[in-house]
Amino acid sequence: MKWSLKHQTQLHASAQRRHFDTHQCYVVELLGSPGCGKTSLIRASIPLMGPCGVVNGEMSSFHDHTDFDPNCKWTMHIDTSNRCHLEARDLHAIPDENLDRVPFVFVENVGNLVCPTSCPIGAHLRVLVLSVAEGADKLAKYPVAVLAADVLLISKTDLLPFVSFDLEQARRDAQRLNPLISVLQVNDQDQNLLRPWVDHIQVRANAYHLSRGLCPWH
């Protein structure tokens, strides 16, 4: 029986999700354009969190694969070569012992708002990061990215005095396209804006661990 490419992708993602579940590891995938602030957001969030791991997918550079807080117990760079997205099979490279060391993993996908959205990797939570410098209309231009996400993070809000960005328009567009999406503002320079984001994923991760009869993660 021949499977469509989309169906094969879903099967690989489901298998990878089961693998994460076997190791009791909650996985958050970050999607977004180049320069939207995915890496800096991860760096800023880790000190507020417990032990975690970080996977960084890039087409060629190792630039983002350094300088994380001690709470980050391990990092892994995945070179996708000419592919503009990670695939579930790429995450087979994570050693099982790494997954066993932490209850939580960030996966930073390649900077792209098209390819990664249609290629799930088995993460428990998909987060779309949109910088205010990109413009609020970007959500309407890339609806598949909004539909694929569980959370929208509007990042680099410290730039709001210097750019034209309509927060309410962004929120309306996101929730019109995806009524279930959560919308949060973040600024990696301001812990008051980082804390709600970290609390949000910790609540979701704790619910996941409790549903599996595990101790809450904190």
Image (spheres, grey):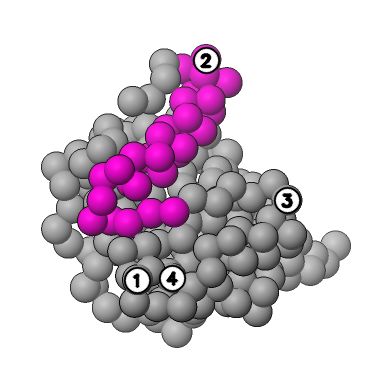
Q: CA distance from mark 3 to mark 1?
A: 28 Å
Residue 168 visible, this orientation = yes
Marks 4/3 in contact by CB < 8 Å: the verdict is no
Q: Earlier in the sequence, mark 4 or mark 2?
A: 4
Name which residue type carries label 3: Pro
Residue 198 place in picture, x, y as percent: 37, 40
Residue under numbered circle 4: 132
Q: CA distance from mark 1 to mark 2?
A: 46 Å
Part of the protein shown in magenta: 185-214
Residue under numbered circle 3: 179
Name which residue type carries label 4: Val
Q: Earlier in the sequence, mark 1 or mark 2?
A: 1
Q: CA distance from mark 4 to mark 3?
A: 21 Å
Residue 183 place in picture, x, y as percent: 55, 51
Q: Nearer the viewer, residue 162 or 127?
A: 162
Q: Is 208 inside the magenta-drawn segment?
A: yes
What label sits on residue 213 in the rendered view? 2
Q: CA distance from mark 3 to mark 2?
A: 30 Å
Q: Local crowd at mark 2 within 10 Å, few (<14), some, or many (≥20)?
A: few
